Image: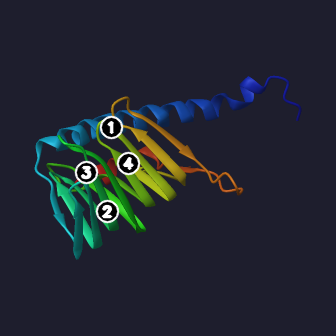
Amino acid sequence: MVVTNSREMFKPNMKSFNKFFTSLSIGLILVSGEIKAQILFPISIESDLAERNERTGVTIYRGNVLITQGNLSIQADLVTITENAEQITKIQCAGSPASFEQLNITSSIPELVGSANDVEYLLQEQQITLSQNASLSSNGTVITGDSINYDLKNEIWKAGGAENSQKRIRLFIPPKSVKSQNSTP
C-alpha cells in the first residue's frame, strides 16, 4: 500500500491524541488550582534528623521525611528547604524514589501522584521538576520519562527521555470507561 498523503495516514491518531491532551489538560488545570490553594494551609514536617543554617536560610531534613500541607503530601529520604527572609523559595527532595500525592478533598482518592529520584518545587515560579525515573499520573493517565517539568501557573507539562540513551517518554492513556471507574469513589 502506498500512502500519498501523510496527513490522511495520521488523522485518526491525531484525533485520539487531541482528545487525550484535552482531557489531561483539563485534569491538570483542576489539580493545579488545588495545588495553588495549598499555600493557605500550614506545613507539617516530620523526619529522623533536621539541621538548619540560619545564615543561609537552608534546612536539611534526613531520614523518612514526610511533609504535609492540606491534602498534599511529600515523602523522601532527604529534603532541603531554602528560605529567604520572607518565605520558602525552594523545596528539593531526593529518594528512591521521592514521591508526592494530592488527594481528592471529598473522596480521599489520589488525584495527582508523582515520583522521581529528585523532585524540585520552586514556589515563587510555581514549577515542579521531576528528574531521573520520573512518573506523573492523573485520573488513570500516566506519563513516565527521565524528566517531567510541570508549570502550575500556566498548566503546561513537558516530558523528556534521557539524553544519553535511547530511553524515551511513555504515555499510558486508559479507555474512557476505565477513567470513569477510577474517578468514582
Going 35% across and 61% down the picture, which residue do you hit? 99
SS state under label 3: loop
How many C-alpha atoms fall within 10 Å of the one at disc 3: few (<14), some, or many (≥20)? Answer: few
- Looking at the image, is mark 3 or mark 1 earlier in the sequence? 1
Label 4 near label 1: C-beta < 8 Å? no
Q: CA distance from mark 3 to mark 2?
A: 34 Å
Q: CA distance from mark 1 to mark 4?
A: 27 Å
Q: Amino acid at mark 2?
A: Val
Q: CA distance from mark 3 to mark 1?
A: 29 Å
> In screen coordinates, is 127 left or right of 108?
right
Give the farthest residue toward the right: 2
> In screen coordinates, is 28 left or right of 17?
left
Q: CA distance from mark 3 to mark 4?
A: 9 Å
Question: Which quadrant of the rendered structure holds the N terminus?
Answer: top right
How many C-alpha atoms fall within 10 Å of the one at disc 4: few (<14), some, or many (≥20)? Answer: some
Q: Residue 16 at what x, y percent from top left?
A: 55, 35
- Return the residue nearer the eye: 151 or 182: 151
- Looking at the image, is mark 3 or mark 2 earlier in the sequence? 2
Q: Which residue is mark 3?
A: 184
Q: Which residue is mark 1?
A: 126
- Looking at the image, is mark 2 or mark 1 earlier in the sequence? 2
Do we see residue 139 in this rendering? Answer: no
Q: Which residue is mark 4?
A: 179
Q: Residue 80 at what x, y percent from top left?
A: 32, 59
Q: Amino acid at mark 4?
A: Lys
Q: Which residue is mark 2?
A: 79
Q: Amino acid at mark 3?
A: Thr
Q: Residue 95 at what x, y percent from top left?
A: 40, 68
SS state under label 1: loop
